[in-house]
Amino acid sequence: MAANICGILLAAGASKRFGSDKLLHPLAGGTPVAAAALANLRSALPHVIAVVRPGATMLENLLSAAGATVILCTNADEGMGASLATAVGASGNVSGWVIALADMPYIRPETIVKIAASLAAGAAIVAPAYRGERGHPVGVSARFRAQLEALRGDEGARSVLKENAGLVKLIEVDDPGVCRDIDTPADL
């Protein structure tokens, strides 16, 4: 069903607010934050591209060993838009992407499956909502490839969603993880 949909794990941030590399920080069970986010994404989508910043060798090795195709974003300091553009450009001929953030390890795999299935069924843009709050990951169809590849700055796909607000399909899910990211140690 979602065979031609690519998962993208954005993992090229600098963890400035966390104080250390939050993506390598272990969760309660010992799994690093980024590895948990990747495991959830990979359980729903077999093909996942993870984007990391140059020099993040430990993270690159961790994500590669966990089954992601890891690519470096040489201009990661420009922000999330640059990372997303890099991943989309490297994804090949796919029908869409499920874009996940590596600092969101609590999203349930069944939520990701719902996003991918909606995309596969023809949705242009799809996102989960928990108790009315839009969350992640966001599914975007290939018709937006040019806009995604042109992204810069730190907004990620937000501008694409804003410009196409009428096309965004929200799926209400009973998954608080779609709204829970880790920015500081207190978020753990």
Image: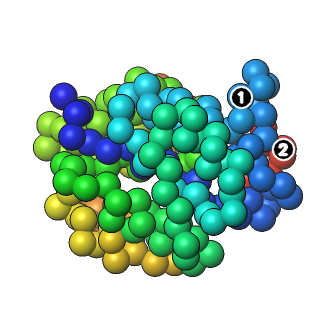
SS at badge 2: helix
Residue on which disc 1 sits:
31
On the picture, is 54 further left or further right than 162?
A: right
Residue on which disc 2 sits:
186
- Residue occupying image coordinates x 39% and y 68%: 85
Residue 61, how many percent across, how many down?
63, 44
Amino acid of disc 1: Thr
**In the picture, residue 27 is in which quadrant?**
top right
- Residue occupying image coordinates x 42% and y 66%: 86
Q: CA distance from mark 1 to mark 2?
A: 17 Å
- Residue occupying image coordinates x 33% and y 65%: 89
On the picture, is 28 further left or further right than 100?
A: right
Residue 187, how many percent across, how many down?
77, 43
- Residue occupying image coordinates x 61% and y 49%: 60
Q: Is residue 51 visible?
A: yes
Amino acid of disc 2: Ala
- Quadrant for the N terminus, please: top left
**In the picture, residue 63 is in which quadrant?**
top right
- Quadrant for the C terminus, please: top right
How many neighbours does mark 1 have within 10 angstroms: few (below 14), some (14-19), or many (20 or more)? some
SS at badge 1: loop
Q: How many marks?
A: 2
- Of the pair 65 and 20, the residue shown nearer to us: 65
- Point out the residue furthest to the left here: 122
**Quick check: marks 1 and 2 in contact, CB under 8 Å?**
no
Q: Is residue 171 visible?
A: no
Residue 150, how many percent across, how many down?
34, 77
Between discs 1 and 2, the one toward the N terminus: 1
